[in-house]
Amino acid sequence: MGEHLLIGITSILIFGIGAQWIAWRFKLPAILLLLISGIAAGPVFGLLDPDLLMGDLLTPFISVAVAIILFEGGLSLRFSELKNIGGVIGNLVSIGVLVTWAITGISAFYLFPFDWGLSILLGAILVVTGPTVIIPLLRQVRPSGQVGSILKWEGIVIDPIGAMLAVLVFEVILSTSFSAATSLAVMSIVKTIFFGTIVGLAGAALIYFLLKRHLLPDFLQNPISLMVVVTVFTISNMLQHESGLWATTLMGIALANQKSAHIHHITEFKENLRVLLLSALFILLAARVELQSLINNLNWDLLVFLVILIFIARPVGVYVSTMFSDLKWREKLFLCWMAPRGVVAASISSIFAIQLANNGFAQADQLMPIVFLVIISTVTIYGLPASWVARKLGVAKPVPNGVLILGAHDWALKIAEAIQNEGFKVLVADANWKNIAVAKKKGLETYHGNILSEYAIDDINLDGVGRMLSLTPNDEVNSLAALRFGEIFGRSHVFQLPPNTKKDEGKEVSSHLSGRILFHPKLNFEKISKIVTEEDDLLVEKITKENLPSEKNTLENKKIPLFQITNNNEIRPFTVDNPPSLTVGSKLFYIPNVNEQVESET
């Protein structure tokens, strides 16, 4: 028994995290791979039995995990985004929800073997999209303008609303009379909003007080915030059934929009925790589905239902919700093409299916396979072509192949011009106005100011930029910039010059506190400034079969490579750790190693 449980836990980690990595590597929707992996781990290979592994803890674990995910989603919402889109978001989570609920419920009644109660319940479950599917797709697609904020707000806020609707329908189904059901529904809505709001705001106030008064050391900020989130969810649910999701979402929004207490550590921790919880949730939920039940529900009725859900319910809901907005038709059309279902739909259907079956509803066991097939289908249909659709509609930001260069001195501008001449976006930042003036004369896009200031990130337009080269003479500035922009571009895409100080001076910056070291370990600012003095010192060479260097002698001590532009039009700086391999057809930008001033490390 113990060995079987260990295999189950290991399967969750391997299939879950493995699916996340493969999705990132090949730019695929992570949810789709997680569902497929869960089905493979459970009914296909028999490595994982969630009910045997977790027993009665499965349902509480699912509920708490969803609450934490929604809290993390709430931390990403800013009221400042609502200035122009608040009305659209309000319509989408109210009118849009009602339209989708009605069309989906009626369709389910006529297509599936459900009575009106189960049909309306299925409609309530499928109104949600959710941050677990929307946010990863938004990161992949990078929509421009207001579309991204609208989808993010809708996906996060609609989850507790959909959960509340599903709970109300569930309670009405189990009620004995219509009048009692109506009274119960009204009171449940009022109590859910009231208790969820009070408890959620109280939890946010507690964390705010502890952080503002500096009563928490850094190493306890994340554990205590997690404790408060779970406590808020539990207390709210005890006061009113299933109001905890609303409470934790509101708690996250409240913390995100206060200005005094710093929540950076909490936000970073919750994002990492979300990946783990999301992976575990989908693996567990998918592993519970019977493979035969999925196959049995793959029929024409399901296909018609999906067509109605995707091509009728969503477009009608979006059109009605955005009728009087200033959104362009292309933006509205993209909103219509972005409504994949996620973890809340999966978890609610799993929980209610069991409870309804125990109460004698014979067809309730069909809820879960239908919902999972809808999730798999919508994630596939919406997710796989999402980037292509966004580009065709003109609502996608440029592919982030551009470069942010810190430092506008002479040879940094030569590098910037060379990159820009190849068609890449280049943004040069410097606090020295004379340097910026020279850069402007050369036709380069610039930012004048301290790149490390609190407001720099808000002022700089980083659309289309995906890498940073820190080329200033100050080692500390280079390292601090690498740390800051590593959170935006990723640690593998921030680069800096090797330090000017020598190791035996004891002033060098630790490697984990810096970016990837550029060009050559001995080519620091001082040395490169001495080498690059003439106009033609920065050279370019097309790599052919004849001049392709051998692996053992790439430089031949004659050239110092700076960066390569590959055949797929991608810029790859040369780094000390894992430099790019030269390929035929690529372009190599280098400076000549005059008199072998930089010695070969080989």
Image (spheres, helix red, strand yellow):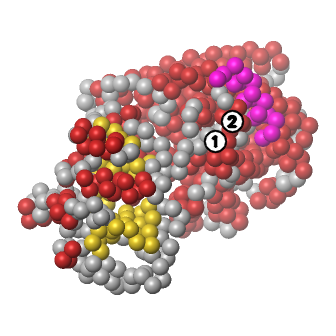
User: Residue at (12%, 63%) from the top-left corner?
Assistant: 502
Q: Are marks 2 and 1 in contact (CB under 8 Å)?
A: yes
Q: Position of residue 113 (x, y in %)?
A: 90, 42
The residue type indicated by label 1 comes to Gly
Towards the viewer: 440 or 89: 440
Residue at the spot of label 1: 394
Towards the viewer: 541 or 215: 541
User: Residue at (34%, 41%) from the top-left corner?
Assistant: 440
User: Residue at (46%, 33%) from the top-left corner?
Assistant: 75
Q: Position of residue 588 (x, y in %)?
A: 40, 69
- Position of the N terminus, as image quadrant, is bottom right
Quarter of the rendering containing residue 311: top right
Residue 359 seen in render = no
> Does 104 sit above or below residue 326?
below
The residue type indicated by label 2 comes to Arg
- Position of the C terminus, as image quadrant, is bottom left
Label 1 secondary element: loop
Residue at the spot of label 2: 330
Query: Outermost residue, left direction?
Result: 505
Mostly what secondary structure, the magenta segment?
A: helix
> Does 572 sit above or below residue 471?
below
Residue 228 seen in render = yes
> Does 330 sit above or below residue 193?
below
Towards the viewer: 209 or 154: 154
Q: Which residues are magenta?
A: 310-326
Whether residue 234 is in magenta: the answer is no
- Is 130 displayed left or right of 479 in the figure? right
- Is 120 displayed left or right of 562 in the figure? right
